[in-house]
Image (cartoon, rainbow, N blue to C red):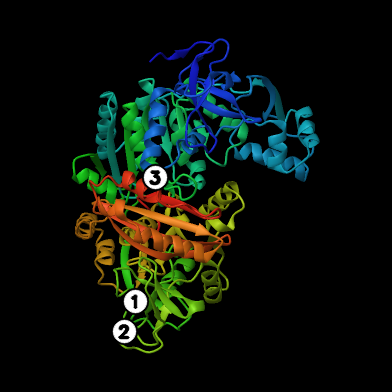
Amino acid sequence: MSDFFHHGDLVAVLTTQPLDRLLDYKAPEGGCHLGAFVEVPLGPRKVLGVIWGPGVGDYDRAKIRPVFRVLDVAPMREEMRSFLTRAAEYTLTPLSAMLRLGTRSPGLGDPPAMRKIYRLGAAEPDRMTKARQKVLTVLRDYGGLSFTLRELAEMADVGTSVIKGLVGQNAILEQEAPRDSPYPALDPDYGGKTLSPDQTAGAEALRAALRSDAYGTTLLKGVTGSGKTEVYLEAVAECLRMGRQALVLLPEIALSGEFITRVEARFGMRPAEWHSGVTMTERRRCWRMVGQGDAQLVVGARSALFLPYQNLGLIVVDEEHDTSYKQEDGVLYNARDMAVLRAAINGAQVVLASATPSLESWANVEAGKYQRITLTSRFGAAVMPTMTAIDMRVENIPNNTWISPTLRNAMRDRIGRGEQSLIFLNRRGYAPITICRACGHQIGCAQCDARMVEHRFLKRLMCHQCGETTPLPTVCPKCEAADRLSAVGPGVERMGEEVETLFPDARIAVLSSDLYGSARAMKAHIAEIAEGGADIIIGTQLVAKGHNFPLLTLVGVIDADLGLQGSDLRAAERTFQLMRQVAGRAGRAQTPGEAMLQTYQPEHPVIRAILAGDEESFWAAEAAERKAAGVPPYGRMAGIILSSPNVQDVFDLGADMARRDGPLRQIGAQVFGPAPAPIARVRGRHRVRLLVKADKAAPLQKALAQWAGQFRLPTNLRLSIDIDPQSFY
């Protein structure tokens, strides 16, 4: 097949519109290349598309319209088209939706032009006003980035005249610049650090893998604070020396500020950034420069995987176990798995970095599919914190409070010594399970292996896997204690009130991603706390990630058990990872840290493995359990979520789907449900879920497509299929 189409040739165009097929057009004057980004007429509108191949021409040629114009950007490479196609097939997503992920750049079709940009100048203004201060703060916060007049005015929340006034004083520089300029060259030999012996060995192994010029995946494992970042930045340096592009994926925008500073210190310049916190102008520039090969390193969120790299040689997935790599709305994909797919197509290397890897990655190492590098020692003076369990069954604690006397005394000690304590809530994403506060028993479902969830307004317990319900018991089914059953888990606000009552003079900071208006506000608050701006920090998952609090020496985990046996198959794994990650926040400077886990089940194998720090035995036990149950990574799963404003419609369709499961039975798959989703209503839509379980080798996608294809959906009903679900909400 020729890569070039001449004027008048029929071409097949994939558009970003929700259509289930390619559309035929005539090639424009001057012709077009395979993969060219084009604008085509569709009804009365002009839409974005990509030349996907030769046209079929199976209807009247006279009615076929010509391509409107070819955009002035590098054509989509063959490997990118292959990646989008295979990702669409794997996730059962329409190809047009995948293309939308690959073209999320504003103003793609705009011609290159000059524009005025504004950046920080050297002079101080003659007088400082509140508005002027806001503008200069934004420019300093963004470390010398340039902005258009409108962007800067919006971000500082001031009028444009304030900025013009600062230009007149040389406090801001106004320059003419091309709309999309190349990123400054990074120097791989600029700021290399002296590495420890095991870091040096790890870096050398990664360099050797890169020099092979072939696909491979390496799990880079090391305790929190062991210097994984330095090791994979050496791999980035090697990739740059080879003239290839590198991508570092981070799980949270909140982490990117500190990380960008480290990259700049290592390579002498800032990399390209791609996440929701950068301006539209920067996104457009990043997308174009990546396609031209004028951006050597991109640091970004999961969607940076869909940028049009010219020569991708390395993908680093930092904190690879993190659940935020799974996109939970729109296109349901896991960025870690897609990174491996993308690298395999590009002949690139993948580094999966984590202190607490996912069981999937551990199993791939065991099976010989991935290499493994382990960093054993903590960097510098820091040592791992000591870990202890507080047995809540013997603590004297009033019914509606959560902090045990033992933990309270430890916190009081820290305040006295001018050190920080962190109260960690194992909360987000877990439904309230019911636990006996006398013996620690969690009420399970008689029909399947999930825990029952309390639905207070119904006065019933419900299983979110199979739909079974029972009345709320008044005594514990195991120890028969009366009035000791409670739904576990306070929220951060409730926890804040309790801490204030116990420590009225302490400075308390509540950290939860829901409480911030912007990523920048969150970054600023975290930096302030790290410098000693609080005595007690209260937080959820957010604090487990990457942040460095030098004064933090005590971590208290309020509900270590929560999620040990949820209806989520990864519950034990997540608890293990979180506890290890959170404990790793303590004692990162000179002072040794301590982590205390409040638990009703101190003898539980997961809690014992956490306290002993014995990861290998935890993974082996968890793997054996999953293998026996035939669930991922030793089996395959898919979640089906049905949603509609009409509750009857979703249950009727769910029941019908469970009955007519012929295509799934043919491949030996089982269907569970329908059951109300744990979050049974979202934005006025009722949600019902089914779960499909199959053998590892079963052709699941094909069977799911046949099965779902049998049903006609009412207008208002949506069906989404989640391959390898990570959350079961």
Q: Whole-percent x and y of residue 704?
A: 35, 48
Kind of residue at badge 3? Asn
Residue at 53% x, 73% y is: 503
Q: Residue 121 versus residue 475: which sits nearer the camera?
A: 475
Kind of residue at badge 2? Pro
Q: State the residue position of label 1.
A: 443
- Local packing at callout 2 (Cα closer than 10 Å; few below 14, some 14-19, many 20+) is few
Location of residue 349 with respect to 476 vertically, above or below: above
Q: Residue 27 versus residue 180: which sits nearer the camera?
A: 27
Q: State the residue position of label 3.
A: 334
Location of residue 168 with respect to 327 vertically, above or below: above
Q: Are marks 3 and 2 in contact (CB under 8 Å)?
A: no
Kind of residue at badge 1? Ile
Mark before the other along the chain sequence, 3 or 2: 3
Kindly report the distance in space between the C-alpha atoms of the residues bearing marks 1 and 3.
Answer: 32 Å
Mark before the other along the chain sequence, 1 or 2: 1
Kindly report the distance in space between the C-alpha atoms of the residues bearing marks 3 and 2.
Answer: 39 Å
Q: Residue 371 versus residue 549: which sits nearer the camera?
A: 371
- Local packing at callout 1 (Cα closer than 10 Å; few below 14, some 14-19, many 20+) is many
> Toward which corner of the image does residue 242 lie, by quadrant?
top left
Mark before the other along the chain sequence, 1 or 3: 3
Q: Secondary structure at mark 2?
A: loop
Dot label at residue 477: 2
Q: Whole-percent x and y of residue 296?
A: 45, 25
Considering every residue shown, the one lying at the far front of the view is 60
